[in-house]
Amino acid sequence: MGGAVAPEGVDENSMGSAAVDIAPTGPDTLVRRIMGKLPRWLILSLTVLGFAVPVGMYFQMVHRYAINVVFWDQLEDVTVIKASYSHFFPWGVMWAQHNETRIFFPNLIVVLLAHTVQFNVVIEEYLSASILVAAIALIIWAHKRRSPSVPWLFYCPVAIVMLSLVQYQNALWGFQIAWPLTMLSLAAAIVFLDRIKLHWAFVGLAILAAVVGSLTIIQGFLIWPVGFVLLYHRRRLLTTLPWGVAAATTAAIYLRNFDTSLGSPFPGYASHHLADSIKFYLYALGSVLGIPYSASPEDSSAQWVQLFGFATVVVAVIAIFLFGIKRDSSTGSPIGVVLILFGLGFAAMMTKGRIIGGLPQAGQSRYATFDLLVLAGTYLALLGHPPLPAVIARWQSARADQVPGITSTSNGERTRVWPTRVLLPTVGALTGALIVVQVVYGFHYGNQGATLFSMSQKGVLAMEQKIHQVTAAQASSLYFSLEPGPWVTERIDLLQSHHLGPFISTGKP
């Protein structure tokens, strides 16, 4: 497909064959003044440390705690591996549902790992971490492309938040590679779809990224609606047609022979218990603190987690109000809005499917990866807002007898400035405070959780070493006791006979 799709701010119906490059606006002048007073070497050093430290800490967690062990849902991977010995890519098995989702592309990775590195789970976890880092880098780059005058130093909080150790389950559980892969799909879709000069080839690449995300976990389908939001902001009306057709086609293929009974056993529970759903939802968003759930009535930690979740929703909604309604053809703020909507949507889908598990389920570490998007997105929405000198000038010219929050422009038009005068500083300060709290708590409880999770994996590995000496109930516990002991034993035997996973090289762990 040739030709160009109109960039933001250009009427697609009247454009020629070449797209016009619109220069994005930058942050307010106060930022530049502050940066101008700091030595260049200090800014560079802080920037390098701001990116290197969170990346290094995340990989250090993998290096310290990663264990080559297969357990829980990853035993389903063994079924795929077994089928791959008959047909290298067993499409039927790879396409089969896992609970309420299809994990086609993670299954593809599993087959490749089994036939190249003997399904070494530690390598899979390093690959997962690398994919997550790549996704975060793409998101930051996409925003920077739209707000070029924002110093790189100001993007360090995004890396620090999104690489929080609180998501240790995704880092140390090979099966969870689906989550970083979905994040990478979202980031790639944003990068391709939000190009300043958008050609049809890049629209195709964005669609491909969204398809990969959709066929990785069911929440990947959120890429399609948030993509529409981005297209709305960039005034790319024509692009919505192929984007919508691709979304509908992907959904139709996905739902063919789809068994909805494999999802939550009580699909209507969330809608019939709204109070519980709200508590679950807020707890899920607040669980990025990593505070372990306590059922003790004397322990108020659950209420604090929910309060943090509520504050996160408040700043996110304000950011959407400020930057998500009125079209923005140039700045990076819409990218932040897209991340917020994805994170809030993920929490809503997770609430519907997992509420039956109660608050302990909402606080699972593996969900934190997408819950963190809400904070990171709010920060990026604020970071990308246009300069404020004109607004400040209006504040200074407002007369004391005017209605509060209303001033007159040069042409006599009366304009409300209270959203910028009140909400921007408030939501900025609150977002900064929430990020600081998350970073501190996430580091502490993330390290604690990673230690305990690694200890539980060591116990699983010990049982796999003597799988024929444990009881059927113990073997069944390796898969949440959802499958009988013989089913689990059969898969451990296959790993051992083919020298895979914990049985690499010698046939022994």
Image: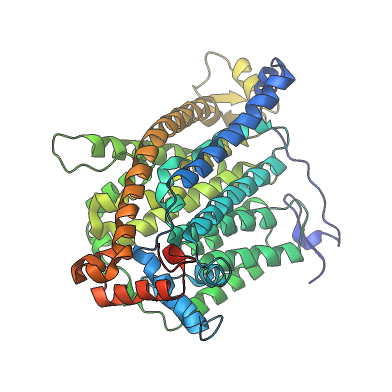
In the image, residue 490 above or below residue 167: below
Q: Nearer the viewer, residue 378 or 216?
A: 216
Q: Quadrant of residue 205?
A: bottom right
Q: Quadrant of residue 19?
A: bottom right
Residue that protrudes farthest toward the bottom in the picture:
86
In the image, residue 438 above or below residue 425: below
The location of residue 354, given as percent across then percent down, is 30, 59
| Relative side of 496 to 472, left or right | right
Residue that protrudes farthest toward the left in the picture:
297
Q: Quadrant of the N terminus?
A: bottom right
Q: Nearer the viewer, residue 388 or 268?
A: 268
In the image, residue 269 above or below residue 317: below
Going 29% across and 77% down the picture, which residue do you hit?
A: 487
The location of residue 217, given as percent across then percent down, is 46, 65
Q: Quadrant of the C terminus?
A: bottom left
The figure's colour scheme reads: rainbow
- Residue 438 seen anywhere in this rendered image of the structure: yes
The location of residue 10, given as percent across then percent down, is 76, 53
| Relative side of 464 to 501, left or right | left
In the image, residue 23 above or below residue 508: above
Q: Nearer the viewer, residue 158 or 485?
A: 485
Residue that protrudes farthest toward the front in the picture:
506
The location of residue 262, given as percent across then percent down, is 32, 74
| Relative side of 254 to 364, left or right | right
- Residue 373 seen anywhere in this rendered image of the structure: no
Going 51% across and 86% down the picture, which residue do you hit?
A: 86
Going 68% across and 23% down the picture, which residue do you hit?
A: 43
Total numbered labels = 0
